[in-house]
Amino acid sequence: MKVDVLFFAVLREAAGTSCQNVDAPAGATAGDLARRVLDTLPSIPRSLPVSIAVNEEFVEPDYPLHDGDTVAVIPPVSGG
């Protein structure tokens, strides 16, 4: 299945893009996809906690993905 992945903040910088179309296997969950995406970004620590939203709704990592979903992978935000 095809899903669009949106990157924010440090993840966008590491990926060099704000959006990427990704092939995900049938039965993939939001957490599976987030881990897979983080694994492709060597400058990002594997332990980075991220929030995940699917189709503009925050979801748990075990949320099942569907063809055509838009998945946002959101790193922790700090400000000042």
Image (tube, rainbow, N blue to C red):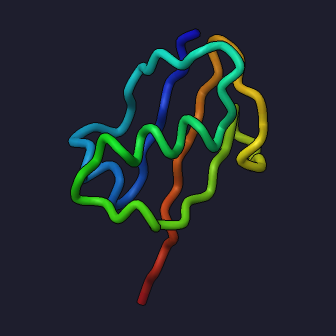
Between 37 and 12, the one lying in front of the other is 37
**In the figure, is residue 66 to the left or right of 15?**
right
**In the figure, is residue 34 to the left or right of 68?**
left
Q: Position of residue 11 (x, y in %)?
A: 35, 53
Question: Within the image, what quadrant is residue 26 found in?
Answer: top right
Q: Position of residue 9 (x, y in %)?
A: 37, 59
Say above or below: 21 vs 46: above
Between 19 and 60, the one lying in front of the other is 60
Residue located 21% across and 42% down the image: 16
Q: Position of residue 79 (x, y in %)?
A: 44, 83
Quadrant containing the N terminus is top right
Question: Within the image, what quadrant is residue 70 found in?
Answer: top right
Question: Within the image, what quadrant is residue 49 found in?
Answer: bottom right
**In the figure, is residue 19 to the left or right of 59?**
left
Residue located 39% across and 32% down the image: 19
Tell how many labels: 0
Residue located 44% across and 21% down the image: 22
